[in-house]
Image (cartoon, rainbow, N blue to C red):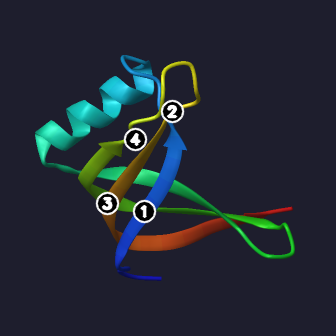
Amino acid sequence: MGDYPDLTCTMNYEPGSPTDLLIKEHLASKEKRPCKIVVVEEDGTRQDGAGMIFLKTYVKDNASLGSTREATLTGRVRGFTYTAEVV
């Protein structure tokens, strides 16, 4: 489908988790890497897509001790195409 503006997603954040470490490594590398994106439509159907992503920011919240933490990840997606439709 092409190029899109920045993609922003909010995720659960667990300091030092494998996901946290992978995102930090990707940011530090300043590389574009392959990505998979699942788009959930309003009717509940899902579509898988693939492209390349360049991560720009990874911002962790300041949640209080003991509460669920979240982080916001922002990246630029290029060359995105739908690969399959999943119901």
**Label 1 residue SS:** strand
Task: Tell me which label, 4 or 2, sits earlier in the chain.
Answer: 4
Q: Amino acid at mark 3?
A: Gly
Q: Amino acid at mark 1?
A: Thr
The residue that disc 4 covers is 61
- Pointer 4 with pointer 2, Cβ within 8 A: yes
**Label 4 residue SS:** loop
The x, y position of residue 8, in whole percent, is 42, 62
The residue that disc 1 covers is 8
Q: Is residue 2 above or below residue 18?
A: below
The x, y position of residue 13, in whole percent, is 47, 32
Report which quarter residue 61 is drawn in: top left
Q: Assess disc 3: are there few (<14), some (14-19) or many (≥20) residues with their C-alpha within 10 Å of its C-alpha.
A: some
- Pointer 1 with pointer 2, Cβ within 8 A: no
The residue that disc 2 covers is 69
The residue that disc 3 covers is 75
Task: Tell me which label, 1 or 3, sits earlier in the chain.
Answer: 1
**Label 2 residue SS:** loop
Q: Amino acid at mark 2?
A: Arg
